[in-house]
Amino acid sequence: MVAYGRHVGLDRLLFNLTNHWTYFSMVATLSYIPLLALLWFPQWPPLLRRFFWTMVPVWVMVHLFMATLAEARLFLVPQALIFIPAAFLVSSRDAAERRTSGRDRILVPEAEDPRV
């Protein structure tokens, strides 16, 4: 199958890696969420890490060689199933830790006791 004048395989891989529109569309579509989620990869729940290793490497490799990455909507599946839930879990866990540790409390000066 020939799309964008490129055959599936190494020809498509070279096209994907050298096409400047690919990078623009991937960043515009996915934003910073995958990077944000991957920064906290060790804190992900084990089941989500298992889903990541089961799906994302295969998804990326198949699409690198067989699809045109400038059509970045192809990566919305791992975004919706892996990266967005991971970002939510990590950010909500971090917010809960701040609440329990008191790091997010607003420091207000205590009022003087008028009885003293």
Image (cartoon, helix red, strand yellow):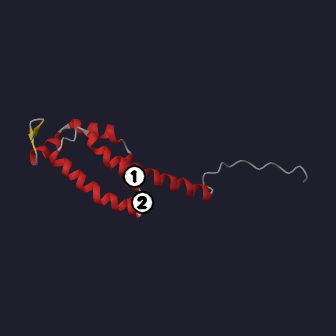
74 up-or-down from 92: above or below: above
Q: Dot 2: within a 10 Å radius of its alpha carbon, few (fewer than 14), some, or many (20 or more) residues?
A: some
Q: Position of residue 99 (x, y in %)?
A: 60, 55
Q: Quadrant of residue 12?
A: top left
Badge 2 is on which residue?
A: 44
The answer to whether 42 appears left or right of 110 in the picture is left
Give the secondary structure at mark 1: helix
Question: Which residue occupies 39% across, 46% down?
Answer: 33
The answer to whether 65 appears left or right of 95 in the picture is left
Choose between 56 and 112: the one closer to the eye. Answer: 56
Work out which quarter of the rendered image holds the C terminus and state it: bottom right
Q: Position of residue 53 (x, y in %)?
A: 30, 60
Amino acid identity at mark 2? Trp
Badge 1 is on which residue?
A: 37
Amino acid identity at mark 1? Ala
Give the secondary structure at mark 2: loop
Q: Position of residue 87 (x, y in %)?
A: 43, 51
Question: Which residue occupies 36% across, 41% down?
Answer: 31
Choose between 65 and 105: the one closer to the eye. Answer: 65
Q: Quadrant of residue 57?
A: bottom left
Judged from this view, the residue extending furthest toward the right is: 115
Choose between 110 and 59: the one closer to the eye. Answer: 59
Question: Which residue occupies 27% across, 37% down?
Answer: 25
Q: Position of residue 50 (x, y in %)?
A: 34, 62
Q: What numbered label is drawn on residue 76?
A: none
Cα distance in 3D space between marks 1 and 2: 9 Å
